[in-house]
Image (tube, helix red, strand yellow):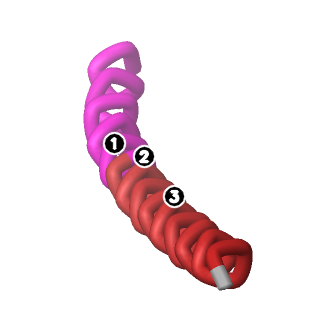
């Protein structure tokens, strides 16, 4: 019985790792988009203040 549990844990941990990888990738993409948006906002506000 212990062998069955370890096999499930091994398969479950790889799927967990896959979910974590996907979550991390999505999080990094979201942060990158936010940083890009913030940089764009800063450029537009500095352009307006210079005029």
Residue that mark 2 sits on: 20
Comparing 8 with 47, the one in front is 47
The residue at the point 46 percent across, 70 percent down is 36
Residue that mark 3 sits on: 31
Residue that mark 1 sits on: 17
Label 2, secondary structure: give it: helix
- Mark sitting earlier along the chain (2/3): 2
Q: Is residue 13 above or below residue 46?
A: above
Comparing 30 with 48, the one in front is 48
Total numbered labels placed on residues in the image: 3
Farthest residue to the top: give it: 2
Label 1, secondary structure: give it: helix
- Mark sitting earlier along the chain (1/3): 1
Give the main secondary structure of the magenta stretch.
helix
Q: Quadrant of residue 8?
A: top left
- x and y percent of residue 44 in the render? 62, 81
Region in magenta: 1-20
């Amino acid at each position: 019985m212990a062998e069955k549990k370890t096999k499930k844990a091994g398969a479950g941990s790889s799927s967990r790792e896959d979910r974590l990888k996907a979550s991390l990738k999505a999080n990094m993409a979201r942060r990158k988009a936010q940083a890009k948006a913030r940089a764009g906002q800063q450029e537009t506000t500095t352009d307006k203040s210079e005029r």
